[in-house]
Amino acid sequence: MAQVLRSPSHFASSPRRTLSCDPDDGSNGLLSPSNGIRGGGEEEENERRGAGGAIERKRGTRRGEGVEEQQLSVLALLLTLFRKSLLRCKPEGVDDEDFGSMEIGWPTEVQHVAHVTFDRFHGFLGLPVEFEPEVPCRAPSASATVFGVSTVSMQCSYDSRGNSVPTILLLMQRRLYEQGGLRIEGIFRINAENSQEEYVRDQLNNGIVPEGIDVHCLAGLIKAWFRELPTGLLDSLSFEQVMQCQTEAECSQLARLLPPTEAALLDWAINLMADVVQEEQQNKMNARNVATVFAPNMTQMADPLTALMYAVQVMNFLRMLILKTLKERQESTLEDASLSNADPSDENGHHSPQLHLEACIKEATEDVCVIEEPVVDNLAGVPEERSTKDEEADGPRTSHDNAASEGTAVEHSTRELLSENSARPDGSSGCQESAANCSNAVHTNSHGKKTGQSNNQNHWKGRKAKGKSTSRASLSAEKPRGTSIASRINSKVELVEAWR
Amino acid sequence: MDSSSSSQPEFDYLFKLLMIGDSGVGKSSLLLRFTLDSFEDLSPTIGVDFKVKMVTLGGKKLKLAIWDTAGQERFRTLTSSYYRGAQGIIMVYDVTRRETFTNLSDVWAREIDLYSTNQDCIKMLVGNKVDKESERAVTKKEGLDVARGYGCLFLECSAKTRVNVEQCFEELVLKILDTPSLCAEGSAGVKKNIFKQKPAQADASTSSCC
């Protein structure tokens, strides 16, 4: 009982204490209206204090008898308790004349401390240092959760092409590039260690970006981010539309049909994939391979079999876009070269992420810190003859993949049986039949229809140009954090360079 | 299909084998080596790939239907349906990448528990890429220990150099043949698979009629 009564009194007095700790500031003017209220004085205050239900009854009693107390033995206990609480309050009430101003609605000691703004790119600006710890460290998204959240609710930044992309993606991309991930064999294909991926994902979801994430983990999380979007990136395109796209032109035309948010994300992703493909010699990821590992993450389908077949179509779609992007890059670098090689920074921001990467690496090598990291073993193990074989194998592989693009693996079994030398070269009719059934199911129309989307296109370009300047600003703002990582990976980069 | 059918089956047993493991450990390469005896850089598998190979083992003609699943995360849930009715499961890891080994216990073993319908189904742990001995990150003993823990077979092999590839499948199939319940499932008399038995004519023309 005693505790029940005491604790409310604490509540009442504690705010007063904090307010009175600084009595000599210029807030007195505000007190005058409160004086009138102070007439109610202690009684009111007691009432306030006794807000708990148990005290309701007692309050009535106290009012009736005033400070005379005693006599009624039933109430004796209650009264003593009340007196206790009174004693506790009184001294404070005495030295602090203006406790009446405690009333909600009467602000005291108002003071202009700082002008703080918030924007989604830089978080709080102008926040006084003493308040900083109370603000959770910059979360990578508006909602602290990163995965499985719609882009709409996420903090976005502009990439070098002016696409508005969730900051967390850009962050993971930058880390990946800084750590030389683009040159690691099988990047985006190879799974990270499951436990690390789960750990990092948890951290990111809590708004923390841990240091020293494995490159495969970063790549895996980028894929996971797309995979776990509430709706797949390409879900607004219909199955038929994607199926009908055969040429690069048709594919890019279709890509323009995407809503702006998705279009921006896709453009970012395609450029990321193109960056990977540009390092094909090292990472062995050609356009087909990268598209294959990204494709299943770009759509969401309930039915596994449809998803499988669709993944093949999406893979082709992505591959076309990657190839187109690469071509455009080649053209633009040629143009740049022919024009002049004057301003490197302009060139840098302009087209080629390759150059951007070079810049990152340069930045990294400038740092002095040297820490051994044995990650390059992978790279060192790449035998040279295999890379040449890689090119040679391109021919046969396409036939392989054509079969795959018919949608089912059964196709393979047919070829398998045909080429099988163990038993019967001609005894595959049954399988062929089933294969034929399957390929029928995924029959592709080879001619896509074209839709004029020039308006859309213009809009698209305009947006891009506009974003360019902003992106650089935000990138430079984030730089300081990046350098520490850069220095850590310094030795690795050197090794990579040496290996080349 | 329409030829005169005789009682002579094309094979004595049909077994469904499944290959699982992380992306890039060499599942498809192993299979390519086993079925076509070739080796090349392969693209990532989409969903599931599928190959058939006839082998003769212990005087029995066996038809192996081997399902090669994609290691990509996205397909983990999709491939779950392929576990059904498999008599043998080959869990592949890359001896040069430790993550692929730990993921077998963290991810793939769990998948088997969840989706495999066959209690007696034979499991086999296979460490691939032993040709890269200098980069080895998982010792043979570690592999053996894990295999013992799961009660499964174990081999180290290399799809690139052919080492132990045939043996992988052979040991697995022999073990299946040793298990009566699995043998019964796979025997040619029981038709539960999409593959129909071939008419005898085809059989007779290609292989020695026995």
Image (cartoon, rainbow, N blue to C red):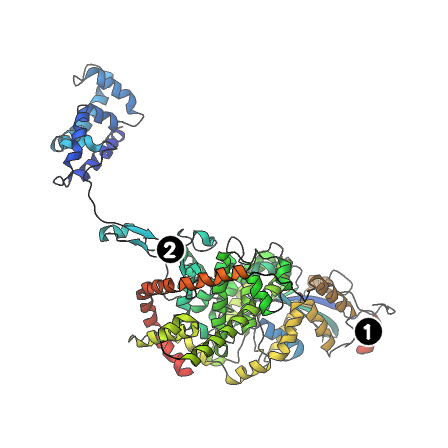
Q: Which residue is mark 2?
A: A207
Q: A242 or A341, which lies in front?
A: A341
The percent position of residue A49, horizontal first and vertical second, equals 24, 28
Left or right: B92, with A441 as reference point: left
Amino acid type for the residue under numbered disc 2: Gly
The image quadrant of residue A448 is: bottom right
User: Which residue is farthest bottom?
Assistant: A385
Mark 1 element type: helix
The circle drawn on residue B202 is: 1
Residue A260 visible in the picture: yes
User: Which residue is farthest right?
Assistant: B4
Amino acid type for the residue under numbered disc 1: Ala
Please tell me whether residue B113 is drawn above or below residue A80 in the rendered image: below
Mark 2: give few (<14), some (14-19) or many (20+) Cα within 10 Å. many
Q: B141 or B199, which lies in front?
A: B199
Q: Quadrant of the C terminus of chain B?
A: bottom right
